[in-house]
Amino acid sequence: MAEETARRGSIYAGAAEPCAIILFGASGDLAKRKVIPAMYDLVQHNSLGERYAILGFARTPMTDDSFRSTIAEAATTISEVGPIEPAKWDAFASNLYYSPGDYADPESYTKLAKRLAELDAEKKLNGNRLFYLSTPPEVYQDIVENLGKAGLAKPSAPGSWTRIIIEKPFGRDLASAKELNKIVLNVFEEKQVYRIDHYLGKDTVQNLLVLRFGNGIFEPLWNRNYVDHVQITASETLGVERRGGFYETAGALRDMIQSHVLQLTSLVAVEPPASFDANAVRNEKLKVLQSIRPFNLEMVAQSVIRGQYSPGKLGDKAVEGYRDEPHVSPGSRTETFVSMRVLIDNWRWAGVPFYLRTGKRLAKRTTEIMIQFKRAPHIVFREKDVQANRLVLNIQPAEGICISFGAKKPGTEMNIGNVAMDFNYIKAFGNGSRSAYATLLNDCLRGDATLFDRGDSVEAAWSLIEPILDVWSAAKTATVPEYPSGSWGPKESDQLLERDGRQWYNP
Ligand code: BG6
């Protein structure tokens, strides 16, 4: 398949081409929990054909066999692998290989190149290669540069392809994201680079585009004339778990807003693309990010709220505060919650606030987009208190769409009640949904970058949040409001909407 021909809108015929997938960070949590299970998912659904090799690379010394046992053990413990068919699993495991190495040592890449050439010849992989960076971001530069030096970044044979998937976080601010783009694009061409944001692989996130552009009834209302405001919530009940060390250097703004939440915002706000292919879709998404009003000092003070979870209760269970979590400094000022008001300065959205919110240890795990429509312009009924329509897209976990509207209550009087029409993914389509990682891997194997981030939009997202990071890092003594675990965040977050005469929709 030529590099640029795959299109998300097309049906993939048959399995992907033979290839080697080289998984850096193969002994890590993400690899075991999500990435390797996604590969198995592809095998199980025959999206990965007979000829493939998965070559793990990490510092941990292991042989092919011990790597296979580690992965098999993970499949029964931490891994998010779906139901296993023993015969398919055995065949899958026999295609797993391992090459220990030091990310910074060029010698390790010479060995890797040799191993790849052997696997290629043995399994007739046609020289196709996908490098997957599932490591801490600190080693991205070493890996990319060493791949370049070892001659592994260029297609290895005429007509073959070489691609690279890079996990988030892609940089930790604008300067580092630019620098990383530079490093990567010194070695690879943009069309070889797939920057992953797993939210884009979720069916319900892609369905946002289908809802808007595959139906005739929503799009005419999808603008400032009918929409009062939009709320996007990505709330988690989990705390930072074992990731305290990483999280201390990140915080919710970097970890969730810069990536997942801005992706959702772009898809809600995006103009219809001319076609469903990587360039058209990504051009339009970039324009949304470029239209968001840049934050200045005053806007940060007024429109961005941060918070940190303190001890509290989740259901009946008492849970610790963020500062008591392992690897978290007792005096930490890292935010575990952010809510903010964003304005999109374009014709469609002028004057329509988008309220974004994310946090850990909140009352409920949910990712939802709520479109609040304006009230009917003139209510002729005696009962004037008719609620405005609301469209809620539940991205996870109760995947579905719900639209609420007023209906006459039965009886002799004209009384109006609020009712809902509900679409539930599982009821409609069954429980067969694939993992977001499987969808994205499958796309990448076919050369379709529509659901991956492009270098310019990663930088645009960092540019947006950079002023907020700057204000926060300058305000070294400002207090970070606390919120009890199990709540919906600090009271300042409620006040953000109350000042605008609105309130959060808490599912
Ligand atoms: C990751 C963040 O990108 O997304 C995590 O680093 C977060 O902190 C996770 O928990 C949420 O993903 P999901 O798919 O569980 O909503």
Image (cartoon, rainbow, N blue to C red):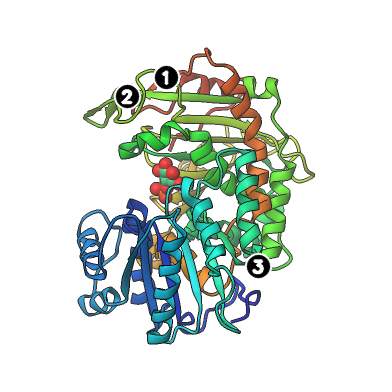
Residue assigned mark 2: 321
For marks 3 and 1, give the CA distance: 43 Å
> Which of the two residues, 503 or 267, is positioned nearer the viewer here?
267
Contact (CB < 8 A) between labels 1 and 2?
yes
Going from N to C along the chain, the mark reached first, 2 or 3, is 3
Quadrant for ligand 1 reads top left
Q: CA distance from mark 1 to mark 2?
A: 9 Å
Apparent side of residue 431 relative to residue 372 in the rendered image (left or right) = left
Q: Secondary structure at mark 2?
A: loop
Q: Which element type, helix, strand or loop, lies under badge 3?
A: loop
Image x and y of residue 415, in percent: 51, 36
Q: Mark 2 is on which residue type?
A: Gly
User: Cβ–Cβ below 8 Å for labels 2 and 3?
Assistant: no
Percent x, y for residue 287? Answer: 73, 50
The residue beneath circle 3 is 276
Picture quadrant of residue 372: top right
